[in-house]
């Protein structure tokens, strides 16, 4: 690993990326020697990852950002999206300013759904054990899924349900933490 810059003719940008890569490998080896994963980084390692994220213009920026998201559960990155225009060449990129949620939430996509829906949930309290319930338009419970605290995803197969409107609730005990309308085609 240390001989790569001598063996290959790297541009200045690639030399910097190699330096960041070497730094990240050293952090990973340090964590593993302590019996920890890189997602259990201390404040010094988090500071190094933030430095890489802010300084790098290459793939190491992506790696550092993804690790920080895994460690901290949030990021300052927002996904761009295209607004529809008569032709794609006229479309303008808009940046969606929606920070990652820090409250109990439930998201369903795609919505409307055909054969399945992906449910993404976020629970502030990692010790919570909650249930996601799917109700049909008559109020009948169609499905219940147990979820635990933190952030997670699950797939809900919907091809056996008749088309219509459904309500999906994220519940802990009798408390409704979030509720989302779902359309099944």
Image: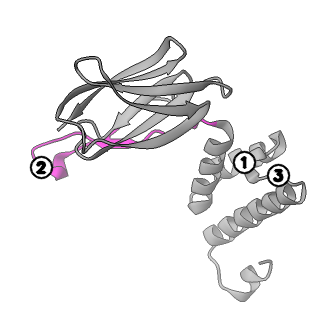
Left or right, residue 46 beside residue 55:
right
Q: Which residues are magenta?
A: 73-96
Which image quadrant is residue 79 in? top left
Q: Which residue: 89% across, 60% down?
A: 33
Q: Which mark is residue 36?
A: 3
Which image quadrant is residue 113 in? top left
Tag 2 secondary structure: loop
Say above or below: 57 vs 184: below
Q: Where's residue 131, x and y in %?
A: 50, 26
Which image quadrant is residue 124 in? top right
Q: Is residue 96 visible?
A: no
Q: Where's residue 101, x and y in %?
A: 51, 27
Q: Nearer the viewer, residue 165 or 94?
A: 165
Label 2 neighbour load within 10 Å: few <14, some 14-19, many 20+: few
Q: Quadrant of the N terminus?
A: bottom right
Q: Which residue: 82% across, 52% down?
A: 36
Say above or below: 134 vs 68: above
Label 3 neighbour load within 10 Å: few <14, some 14-19, many 20+: few
Q: Main secondary structure of the magenta part?
A: loop
Q: Quadrant of the C terminus?
A: top left
The residue that mark 1 highlights is 39
Q: Where's residue 61, x and y in %?
A: 60, 54
**Which of the marked residues, 2 or 3, is nearer the chain's N terminus?**
3
Give the residue furthest to the top.
174
**Which of the marked residues, 2 or 1, is nearer the chain's N terminus?**
1
Q: Which mark is residue 87?
A: 2
Say above or below: 71 vs 107: below
Left or right, residue 114 beside residue 106:
left
Is residue 88 one of those drawn in magenta? yes
């Amino acid at each position: 690993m240390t001989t790569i810059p001598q063996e290959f003719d790297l541009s200045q940008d690639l030399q910097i990326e190699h330096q960041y890569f070497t730094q990240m490998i050293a952090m990973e080896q340090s964590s593993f020697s302590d019996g920890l994963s890189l997602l259990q980084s201390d404040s010094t390692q988090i500071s190094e990852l933030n430095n890489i994220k802010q300084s790098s213009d290459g793939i190491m920026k992506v790696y550092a950002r993804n690790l920080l998201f895994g460690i901290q559960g949030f990021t300052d990155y927002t996904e761009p999206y295209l607004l529809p225009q008569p032709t794609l060449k006229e479309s303008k990129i808009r940046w969606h300013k929606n920070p990652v949620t820090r409250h109990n939430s439930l998201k369903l996509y795609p919505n409307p759904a055909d054969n399945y829906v992906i449910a993404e949930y976020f629970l502030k309290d990692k010790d919570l054990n909650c249930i996601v319930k799917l109700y049909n338009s008559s109020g009948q419970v169609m499905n219940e899924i147990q979820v635990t605290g933190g952030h997670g995803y699950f797939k809900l197969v919907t091809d056996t349900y008749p088309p219509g409107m459904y309500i999906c609730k994220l519940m802990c005990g009798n408390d409704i933490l979030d509720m989302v309308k779902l359309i099944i085609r």
